[in-house]
Every structure is written in structure tokens, then in C-alpha cells.
Image (cartoon, rainbow, N blue to C red):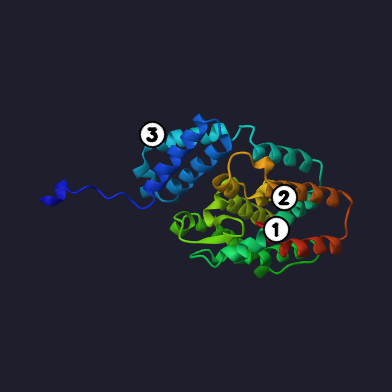
């Protein structure tokens, strides 16, 4: 009988969904589109991870959140404008050049991934360097079926990571000298994990089904900006941050480098340097 009067327990994560959704709405009203996208995307990631969360969040919230995200995808934010310019410039390049341009970005994320891999459930992020080396080798010589399967397995692990509660509930974070700690959920912005997944999957398909691989997507290229971290900890104006300026400069320097027609030895040398880079302090 007493059960009739007991309050229904909310599923884990619902409080965060509501909090992030409200923050996103407030940022939209305050004309902070980049930060609005940050919080609304976080809400969307959490409630999309599990059916019970989606149902508990309710149709009104989920539909409004989705509609707002759609509007913000067209907003003139720093990252949106940079991606549009990258896409325009990528259209001038050959397929291999676009893939290598994106591979440079993945190389710059590898050391961060290795550090994050020590957090609960995040071991897959420690495999980024190995993936970089396999992809680089695939341009120069045949790679084994096991190597390709390892890349696909990593894609699956990265996809599953966003459904893991430890990805978004703040169970672990990394210290950043002179700044706020970095949280694994900061990778949610710009869909970093999804873009890595898409990049690796596309490379495997280009090797196994050349006629069905599609054009390489350049959307991974700006992901080492780590915009979610800076929007969460610093503020809306990314363009004024030295770390953002440095990464943007690296993106355009990579393009200029590729346009010189470098040898694979020079490409590998550049990647080696990036694999050693601490992107949060670089």
C-alpha cells in the first residue's frame, strides 16, 4: 500500500539532462550560440544513450533540444566558420591529401587519448596512436586483415563509449597546468569520438571496397581545437585563446605542407612530432 505514495526514482543521468538543457536554453537567450550548442549537445548525448533516459526526459524536452541544435548548426560560431572553410579547401585536394590532413589531427589527439585511457571505461582512447600508425602505413604498403579489423574494433569501442555513464557523469578528469581539469565529456563537442570513428571506418572501406568508400570527410580536422573544454571552462570567445589560435595555425600549416607534395618520410616525421604533442599545453 505504501508503494502508492513513494516517489518514482528518476533514472541516473536525468538530472544532468535537465540541467544541461536549461543551460543551453539560457545561453541561446543570452546570445552565446557556441556555449548553447555545448550544453544542448551534452543533454542530447545523455538522453540518446539509453531508452529509459529518452523516455524519462519527455518528448517536449527532446524535440525542443533537437530543434535548437539544428538551429545552432547554422550559427556563425568560430568552429562552424572554421569547418566551412576547411570543407571548401578540402574540395581542392585529392582523396589521400584529405585523409592525411585529418590524420595529422588524429595524431595531435593521441597523447590526450593515452592520458584519458586511464579513466574508468576509457581504455579505447589509448589506442589512437596505434590507429594513426596503421593508417599511415596503409598509404605506403598493404596492411593485414587483422590490422583493418583492429581499426573497426576501435570504431565500435569509441561508439560504445558515449553510452557509458562514466563518459558523462564526471567520474574522472585530467589535471591541466594553469587551467581547469579536462573531463572526458569535453570530447562530446564537435563530436570528436564520432568523427574519429567515421575517419577510421572510411579509411578501412577505402581499402576493402574502393568503389563504395565515398569521399573522405574533413570534419575530423578541427577536432583538436577541443572547443568543448574551452567553452566549458573559459567562455564563448574562442578566437582570443592562445591554444585555439595555435591549433588553428597548425591546421592551416598542415594544408600548406600537403600542398608542397611532401614525401611519405616527411609526412611521417610530422606525425611523429604530433604524437609527442600535449595538445592542452601545446
- Mark 1 vs mark 2, foreground winner is 2
Who's the residue at 58% across and 45% down the image?
A: 234
Pointer 2: residues within 10 angstroms few (<14), some, or many (20+)? many
Question: CB of mark 1 within 8 Å of CB of mark 3?
Answer: no
Q: Nearer the viewer, residue 255 or 93?
A: 255
Q: Please indicate whether residue 268 sits to the left or right of residue 2 in the image.
A: right
Who's the residue at 72% across and 46% down the image?
A: 245
Q: In what element is the residue under mark 1? A: helix
**Disc number for residue 168:** none
How far across and how far down the image is residue 191, in percent? 58, 48
Distance between the Cα atoms at labels 1 and 2? 10 Å
Q: Nearer the viewer, residue 27 or 52?
A: 27
**Is residue 221 visible in the rendered structure shown here?**
no
Pointer 1: residues within 10 angstroms few (<14), some, or many (20+)? many
Who's the residue at 88% across and 56% down the image?
A: 262
Distance between the Cα atoms at labels 1 and 3? 40 Å
Point out the tag, 1 or 2, that comes first from the N-terminus: 1
Who's the residue at 60% across and 47% down the image?
A: 230
- As displayed, is residue 243 above or below residue 32? below
How far across and how far down the image is residue 108, in percent? 70, 58
Write down the residue under mark 3. Answer: 60
- As displayed, is residue 236 above or below residue 46? above
Quarter of the picture holding the C terminus: bottom right
Write down the residue under mark 1. Answer: 108
How far across and how far down the image is residue 97, in percent? 80, 51
Write down the residue under mark 2. Answer: 247
Point out the tag, 1 or 3, that comes first from the N-terminus: 3
How far across and how far down the image is residue 226, in percent? 63, 50
Q: In what element is the residue under mark 2? A: helix
Distance between the Cα atoms at labels 2 and 3? 38 Å
Question: CB of mark 1 within 8 Å of CB of mark 2?
Answer: yes
- Dividing the picture into quadrants, the one containing residue 63 is top left
Amino acid at each position: 500500500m505504501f508503494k502508492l505514495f513513494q516517489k518514482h526514482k528518476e533514472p541516473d543521468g536525468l538530472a544532468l539532462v535537465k540541467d544541461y538543457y536549461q543551460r543551453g536554453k539560457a545561453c541561446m537567450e543570452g546570445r552565446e550560440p557556441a556555449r548553447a550548442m555545448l550544453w544542448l549537445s551534452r543533454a542530447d548525448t545523455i538522453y540518446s544513450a539509453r531508452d529509459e533516459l529518452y523516455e524519462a526526459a519527455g518528448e517536449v524536452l527532446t524535440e525542443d533540444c533537437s530543434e535548437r541544435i539544428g538551429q545552432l548548426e547554422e550559427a556563425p560560431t568560430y568552429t562552424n566558420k572554421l569547418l566551412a572553410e576547411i570543407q571548401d579547401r578540402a574540395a581542392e585536394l585529392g582523396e589521400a591529401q584529405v585523409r592525411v590532413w585529418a590524420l595529422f589531427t588524429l595524431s595531435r589527439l593521441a597523447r590526450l587519448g593515452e592520458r584519458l585511457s586511464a579513466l574508468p571505461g576509457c581504455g579505447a582512447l589509448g589506442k589512437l596512436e596505434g590507429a594513426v600508425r596503421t593508417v599511415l602505413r596503409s598509404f605506403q604498403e598493404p596492411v593485414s586483415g587483422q590490422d583493418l579489423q583492429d581499426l573497426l574494433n576501435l570504431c565500435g569501442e569509441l561508439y560504445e563509449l558515449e553510452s557509458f555513464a562514466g563518459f558523462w557523469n564526471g567520474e574522472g578528469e585530467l589535471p591541466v597546468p594553469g587551467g581547469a581539469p579536462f573531463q572526458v565529456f569535453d570530447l562530446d563537442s564537435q563530436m570528436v569520438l564520432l568523427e574519429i570513428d567515421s575517419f577510421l571506418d572510411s579509411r578501412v572501406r577505402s581499402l576493402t571496397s574502393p568503389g563504395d568508400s565515398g569521399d573522405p570527410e574533413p570534419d575530423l580536422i578541427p577536432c583538436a581545437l577541443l572547443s568543448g573544454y574551452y567553452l566549458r571552462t573559459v567562455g564563448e570567445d574562442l578566437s582570443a585563446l592562445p591554444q585555439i589560435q595555435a591549433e588553428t595555425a597548425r591546421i592551416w600549416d598542415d594544408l600548406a605542407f600537403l600542398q608542397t607534395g611532401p614525401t611519405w618520410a616527411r609526412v611521417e616525421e610530422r606525425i611523429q612530432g604530433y604524437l609527442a604533442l600535449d595538445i592542452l599545453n601545446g
